[in-house]
Structure formats: C-alpha cells, structure tokens
Amino acid sequence: MTTPDSTFAGGTWPRTRHATGFGIGIPVAQSKPGATFPHFSDHLALANTAAGTGFDGLWFADHFSFPGDDGLRGSWDAWTLMAAIAASVPNVHIGPMVACTAYRNPGVIAKMTEMIQDISGGRFILGLGAGWQKDEYQQFGLPFEPRVSRFEEALRIIHGLLREGKSDLQGTYSQANAAVNLPRAESGPATPILVGSSGDRMLGLLARYGDAWDTGWGGKTDELKAKVAKLDAACAAAGRDSKSVVRSVSVAVAAAGFAGDPASVLSGDTGEKIRFLRELEAMGFSHLRIGLNPLTPANIEAFAPVIEAFHNGA
C-alpha cells in the first residue's frame, strides 16, 4: 500500500466506549404537515434520553423541507441545532448525516465546524454529501447539477481548512483564495470527515479525503456486501487501506406504535435484533445508526437492553 500523503484523510474518529458504537438520528423535520413537533425542547429531551441510554452518537439531517402528497413538512436548521445540543448534552458525538455542501459556501461549513468542535470539546463529526432532493435546490435557486463536481471542489476546500488551516483552490464552482481557518478548536484532534454515498466517484473522493463512510439504510446484507466491495475497490485504487475507513450504516427498527410495512424494519426480540447487528459488525461496520420508528423517549429507553446485551457479548 502506498503511504498516504497530506492529501489523504487525517482526522481522528472520536474514541467510543466500545469497539462498535450506536448512533441515533434526532428529527429536524415536522412529523407531518402543520405539526408542532419537534421544537427544541423535544430535541433536547430525545438527545438527553439517547445519551443516557447508551447511544454514542447523535445525528441530524440537513434539509430545508420535504414535499409530499399530503403537503410540505418544514425542517429546522441542523447547524444551529447541533451547536445548541453540543453545549447542552455531554459525552456523545454529534454530527450532520449528512450536510449538503451545495447549501453553503465551503468556507462557511469549515468555520461552523470549527466552532461546534470547540463547543463540544472534540465530539463533532463532519458528515458531508452532495444532496439529493431537487425540490430544495429549486426552492432557493441553487444549481442541482453537476452535484459531484461541485461536491469535489467544496470537499477539497473544507479538507484543507480543517487539516491544514488553509486552502487555496480556484475551482469552476468554488474558490478559496489563500483562505485561512482561524481560530482553531481547542480540542486538538482534527475533525473527522464522513462522506455519505455509495456512488463510484463519491467513494473515490472518500478514499482520498474522508475518514469515515456512511452507506445509508442497510436492510439486506447482500446489498451491503456489494457496497463494501465498491469501497474496498475505491480505496485500493487510491492506494489506501480500506480498514482505515470507519464504516457506518443505518438500521430501521420497529418500536412500540409502529404502523408501517414490517418488511421495511428490523423487528423481533432482543436476540433477533442482535443477530442482525452482529452480521453488520462482521462486515466491518463499527457505527450502527438506529432508526427507531416511531422515535420517542420511551422507545429509546426500550432499546437500551439491546445495546446493553450487544456490548456484553450477546
């Protein structure tokens, strides 16, 4: 393997209590059109419950709104919410899953990252993606394509500002003119960069600039194995050991009050859940993001025995 140079990843994934950690998404969007949930008090209650139940990470979607047949669901700003949660909830990692680089200037993303990293004392993970929901781009006059080319330039600027504290790139879509990232977070380790995508070009960029990979929702192990093979190939092409990439996957889990399609979620007793989660761990996923449906403080607490049994070797 070629020894990675300064253009490769170099962040440090925050230390967790166990080799395989659990994460959970904190909702930012209205539960239905016109709903009052969630407000910050709801976010804080869910985050505190998760932190006290054994979850290692809290994740926040980065969106403006979600159109649907029954109307538009609005979404809170993930960045101000993450800053508030970082200041209020200790001992858990926090990050966007994932922040769309097209929605903000890459320098602004780097600056906000540095501030939240300082607020959190080193618990922030920067999840990045190219976006996917065309309606949101159109809503605010943002160009939708070429998404990956735009993402690459933004990622290179963000990577330089976080790793080296500076960036100089005159791209087609983004520019950094001897830009600097000052002051720096007091916590020390460089912020980990997670890339959320399984596309070939995106995996190539991840292999060169990222520290972690999120493959999204993983319901079928055969499909996940195919995605892992693509990651391994991208890392090999870049001269990087794929084992140096932290791997994250989401699992939809039926909780009390679930009324959806049973085939779309993980269900069963504690043992059945753990068996599937062990399969994911064996595939190299060391961060398991649990999507409880519905998500309530009570359902978070009810998942605690699964986490406890998993960490106790069940």
Image (cartoon, helix red, strand yellow):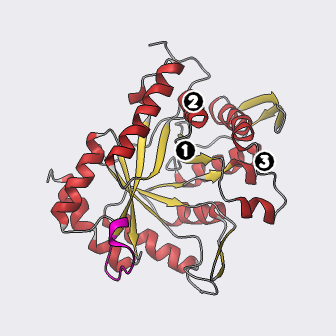
Return the residue nearer the eye: 283 or 156. Answer: 283
Return the residue nearer the eye: 219 or 161. Answer: 219
Instruction: Measure how far apart labels 1 and 2 are at the Cα level.
Output: 10 Å
Instruction: Measure how far apart labels 3 and 1 are at the Cα level.
Output: 20 Å
Whether residue 291 is situated above or below residue 256 in the rendered picture: above
Mark 2 vs mark 3: in front:
2
- Identify which residue is drawn at 84% across, 34% down: 172
Q: Identify residue for label 3.
A: 105
Q: Quadrant of residue 151?
A: top right
- Is disc 3 placed on a helix, strand or loop? loop
Task: State which quarter of the image contains the N terminus.
Answer: top left
Q: Amino acid at mark 3?
A: Asn
Residue 176 picture location, percent across and down: 82, 34
Mark 3 vs mark 1: in front:
1
Q: Identify residue for label 1.
A: 197
Residue 6 picture location, percent across and down: 60, 20
- Identify which residue is drawn at 60% across, 32% down: 205
Instruction: Measure how far apart labels 2 and 3 are at the Cα level.
Output: 22 Å
Return the residue nearer the eye: 212 or 79. Answer: 212
Q: Identify residue for label 2.
A: 204
Which mark sits nearer the N-terminus, 1 or 2? 1
Residue 61 picture location, percent across and down: 57, 61
Which portion, as a residue range, is magenta? 254-264
- Is disc 2 placed on a helix, strand or loop? helix
Q: Amino acid at mark 1?
A: Ser
**Numbered circle sitting on residue 118:** none
